[in-house]
Image: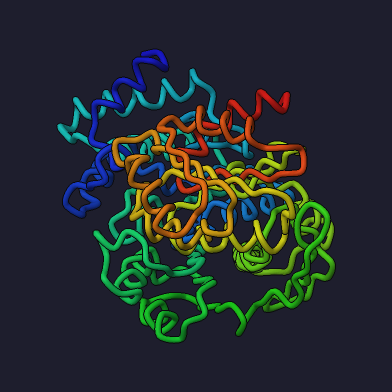
Amino acid sequence: MGLDDALRYLDDHTSYDRTGRIESPSLDRISALCSAMGDPQHCAPVIHVTGTNGKGSTVQMITRLLMASGLTVGTYTSPHLERLNERIRRDNEPISDDELAEQIAAIADLEVLTGVRPSFFEAVTAAAFRWFADVAVDVMVIEVGLLGRWDATNVVDAQVAVITNIGLDHTEFAGPTLAHIAKEKAGIITGQSAVIVGETDPELIAIFGAEPHAALLVRDLDFATADNTLAVGGRLVDLRTPTTVYSDVHIPLHGAHQGENAAVALTAVETFFASPLSDEVVREGFATSEVPGRFEVLGVQPLVIVDGAHNPAGADTCAGVFFDDFAPQARRILVVGTLREPDEMVAALRAEDFDVVIACTAPTPRGVPSELVGAAARAAGVGEVLVIDDPVIAVREALRLADADDAVLITGSIYVVGAVRPYLRRLAGG
């Protein structure tokens, strides 16, 4: 089976990315596949990460800190920006085409042998575990795909369980309150897990504490970002963990929230090792952290930024970084496509503060039609609204309209960012 065959096999299986639906909540299918493979999800200790926002950044920082400590790290994330290979990495290098095809072929054979038909995500998750066992990683950093308790990744036994924060997202599966969502995310905690909680709401923290656990460390109580200031190319932070204060650490990511994510990531890695990290490891780990598609600058003159914010909380954070940290003084152009209620997303992005909004359709069956996104922008009071269905054509128009001093923000969905990022990287020569 070549890569094209492997991708066709996956496309033939149910996918939340395409349908917005999941099969009845169960770990039976993924458990059966893993059991038939000898349970590769137990081949190495696991740091398991869930949360409404910040998972990708936190996973990246954890991975880099572990690598700087000399470990071989298997990292599993979702969704991908441009290629499926991005989801499965060894020391932050994506699995090769041939290796990915080999692993998917093994899952296809198991489907025949076991009679278990996995979903797209279950098949890719099982393939990731199998590959990590094959290449003998020292530790796995696993990002939850959806909520936690019934997510396919939750066949691992997390040595460290991380909850970044809780917001209203995926309420069709766990809602309608934050407490309902917290209970589902708390499902990744086992009796052997040390739990790192970035959420600060006492009622939600109590939900995590109610799960059997080995230890519970909470942001602003047991660890914190003591200082968090704007710096060239990111943030300059002081990080306090249960053991140590690390001063003047540069985080090459944009937004004050990345300083908070850094405190979570550092505490998770310290807890994994049950000891402080050296100052050199901390500085190297954070210095090499990068999160493609998360407030990523892909052009100057005009300033061009992409951000995969996909829910109102993420959109609010995105707008805050754009207007407060970058503070563009010339014309501001927003290109936006979304999978959610466009009124909420447009409001959270502060669309009325942009000079031009170009509405597009996120390239997925779940994308909200560009006409509806444009109508939401007009209703919000935006003076100039254009409707261009294709995200790449929308970005071309934004760049045509922009002068050298202007700023263009492209956001609303990881699918929009994934569609336009190759085009923008070609323009930038990257």
Q: In the rendering, at what x and y percent does residue 367 appear?
A: 34, 41
Query: Which of the 4 quarters of the picture holds residue 128?
Result: top left
- Percent across and percent down for residue 335 are 52, 42
Pick the front one: 104 or 321: 321
Of 53 and 262, which appears nearest the observer? Answer: 53
Note whether 209 is above or below 310 in the view shown.
below
For the point 54% across and 32% down, which residue is it? 420
Query: Where in the figure is residue 361, as x and y percent of width and height?
Result: 39, 37
| Residue at 62%, 65% in the rendered image | 257
Is 198 located above or below residue 57 in the figure? below
Q: Position of residue 414 (x, y in %)?
A: 47, 43
Q: Report the front residue among 11 and 346.
A: 346
The answer to whether residue 138 of the structure is visible from this angle is no
Give whichever of 158, 231 is nearer the camera: 231
**In the displayed structure, would residue 219 be above or below residue 374?**
below
Can residue 85 be spotted in the picture?
yes
Q: Is residue 220 left or right of residue 158?
A: right
Quarter of the image that includes the C terminus: top right
Say whether residue 169 is left or right of residue 332: left
Q: Is residue 349 left or right of residue 212?
A: right
Q: How is the image coloured?
A: rainbow
Quadrant containing the N terminus in the rendered view: top left
How many numbered dots are placed on residues in this image?
Answer: 0
Q: Residue at x 75, y 71 (%)?
A: 228
Residue displayed at 64% across by 49% down: 332
Task: Say left or right for 403 vs 222.
Answer: right
Q: Is residue 87 above or below residue 46?
A: above
Quadrant of res 297 = top right
